[in-house]
Amino acid sequence: MRIQANSLIELLAKGPAESGLATLEMCREMWLKTTLPLPLLEMLRLRTAQLAKCQYALHIRFEEPVEAGLTEAMLAQIHEPERSDLPESWKLALQFAELLLTNPEAISDAYYEEMLLHFPEAQLIEMTYFITHNNVMHRFCVAMQVPPTLGDKIEWRRLGMPVKKAAGQAVPQARSAQA
Amino acid sequence: MQDGESHLPLHEKVALDFAELLIKTPDEIPDALFAELRQHYTESEIIEICWFTLNYYKNHCFNTSVRLVPKDGENVVVEDLHGGTPKGGDPRAVLRSPDARFLA
């Protein structure tokens, strides 16, 4: 790490007025209060981590999205959603995340309208905020060279929320991902 | 803030260079630039620069994506940081703009 600390929390606490800790806490709050499908949220978190090249975040998995149906096979497709077999709404959301962080001006009205076919306004705002907020954490970790806690191993974490698992299979069918 | 034209103090130039890389390519921030940053700022201040920059970047991406429009057209709106009313513009006008993607 560029600034000596034993953990991300310790590093954040070195900042003024606990601003970093508040940002981290807000990430958790968004998870706990989300109305979006947990697998989609985890895909968006990891896609934004990919775009920022945040190894710290990429080596973390939350248990709840997996319990709700997320698989590594699905995660393997998030960098190329248009060629994936993910639900259409999730493809759009992943493409939206990339545009939002790389070229937000390029989000056309037509694209927005298509998003609104799958997500109500409140969810679209939530998604936009989730993506941009996670991006703050990822870029901070990259700039500070925060390493993954367990090296190359995946660190599993629990968010502490109830999981709504769909009967039989949690993976939604195409065009039915609206929560 | 243009390359080669800045007359800003060195510590501000360094902070701006750092902020730009933080947004564009945080994985390519050179050790030399970080070392220079350390010469001008404490660790706490560096972390503060990060949060300040990244949180405003977050706001800008959000605002651009929802097409939030300037409150007073082409005019610069001067606001205080304590919730004061902007000069020359109705702060709610932005929410009524037909260009905004979400009308409040």
Image (cartoon, coloured by chain):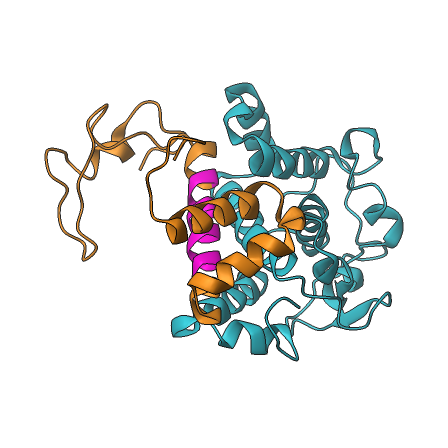
Q: Nearer the viewer, residue A145 or A83?
A: A145
Residue under the point 49% across and 67% down: A20
Residue A173 position in % (x across, y down): 78, 40
- Magenta run includes residue B85: no
Number of labels in the image equals 0
Q: Nearer the viewer, residue A150 or A142?
A: A142
Tell me if residue B8 can be seen: yes
Q: Quadrant of residue B34?
A: bottom right
Residue under the point 26% across and 33% down: B94
Q: Quadrant of residue A145?
A: bottom right
Q: Is residue A32 above or below residue B62?
A: below
Residue under the point 48% across and 43% down: A125
Residue A154 position in % (x across, y down): 83, 66
* Left or right, B95 with reference to A172: left
Residue under the point 66% across and 47% down: B28
Screen quadrant of the N terminus of chain A: bottom right
Q: Is residue A146 above or below residue A51?
A: below
- Tell me the shade of chain B: orange
Which chain is cyan in the picture? A
- Magenta run includes residue B49: yes
Q: Nearer the viewer, residue A86 or A18?
A: A18
The magenta segment is B48-61
Residue extending furthest left? B88
- Magenta segment main secondary structure: helix
Q: Is residue B74 above or below residue B90?
A: above
Tell me if residue A126 can be seen: no
* Left or right, A81 with reference to A21: right
Q: Nearer the viewer, residue B26 or B62?
A: B26
Residue A121 position in % (x across, y down): 48, 39
